[in-house]
Image (cartoon, rainbow, N blue to C red):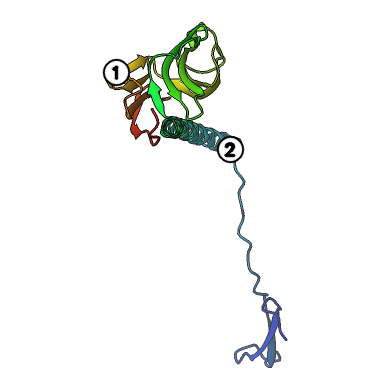
Amino acid sequence: MMNSSTSEVVTTLVPYLPKGMRGQLSIYKAPNMRQKSSSRGFTLVELLVGMVITSIFLAFAGSGLISILQSHRQTEAEVDQHVQLNRAVDFIADDIREAKAVSTTAPSGWIVPANYSAILYLTKPDDSTVAYYTFDTSAGSNWQGPQVIYRATASNAMGNPLVDRVSNASPGCSGSGTSGFEVSPSPLTPSDRSVKLCILGDLPNGTTEIVQYTVTLRSNDV
């Protein structure tokens, strides 16, 4: 099998050669060699310009990515706070449903811990008491604040935290309470069978969100 680059010898007749030289003449045909295209590398200036352009592009891309991540984290924090506020209201509402009486007045002999503000008292069917307080974190706390709602089951005990980031502003429900947490009607007495809860929470973006819920006591005992 002949290679395309193999040289060839072509034999032909040449009629007009001088006497004594007529005959066959072998003509050498040069091989058909493909010429390789020459390649040229990048200069130092071109490399530097490319590096500068790439650096600028990466800087803009990185800035945009950081902005997207920050926005995503803030959105997640806002959603989480919304969930926490609704969960707190649902928890208090379930507590009220199980009570036989509600009031904004402390039972006889009940002591509220220092730096805590009493909001709501529940009397359970077994005559035990559950109290809901707010705590101002400016008095010193590891919570974000400015207010935290606590649930206590014993006199002069701070109880357990229920929800953080409760606002210092009033929810505007015209009820009894302190900043961020109100119950109505005001005043709330053991004869009342329906309670409206209002909690105003602070969101990470600087705005507030109010959660309201009206719950009715299920127990017929007063």
Nearer to us in this view, 129 or 203:
129
Return the residue nearer the eye: 55 or 94: 94
Which image quadrant is residue 158 in?
Answer: top right
Residue at 45% of width from left, 24% of height from top? 123
Q: Which is nearer the eye, 27 or 208?
A: 208
Gap in Å between the C-alphas at discs 2 and 1?
77 Å
Circle nearer the N terminus (2, 1): 2
**Amino acid marked by disc 1:** Ser
Question: Hey, which quadrant is residue 71 in on the image?
Answer: top left
What residue occupies the far front of the structure in this picture?
221
Residue carrying label 2:
47
Residue shown at 71% from the left, 78% from the top: 6
Q: Name which residue type carries label 2.
A: Leu
Front tag of 2 and 1: 1
Q: Residue at x 35, y 33 (%)?
A: 215
Q: Quadrant of the C terminus?
A: top left
Query: Where residue 108 sits in the image (x, y, percent)?
Result: 46, 11
Residue 191 relative to residue 123: left or right: left
Left or right, 174 with reference to 200 = left
Quadrant into which the N terminus falls: bottom right
Q: Which mark is residue 186?
A: 1
Examine the image and state in which quarter residue 118 appears: top left
User: For numbered disc 2, what is the local secondary structure?
Assistant: helix
Residue 177: % across, % down: 36, 15
User: Neighbour class for label 2 at 10 Å: few (<14), some, many (≥20)?
Assistant: few
Left or right position of 119 against 114: left
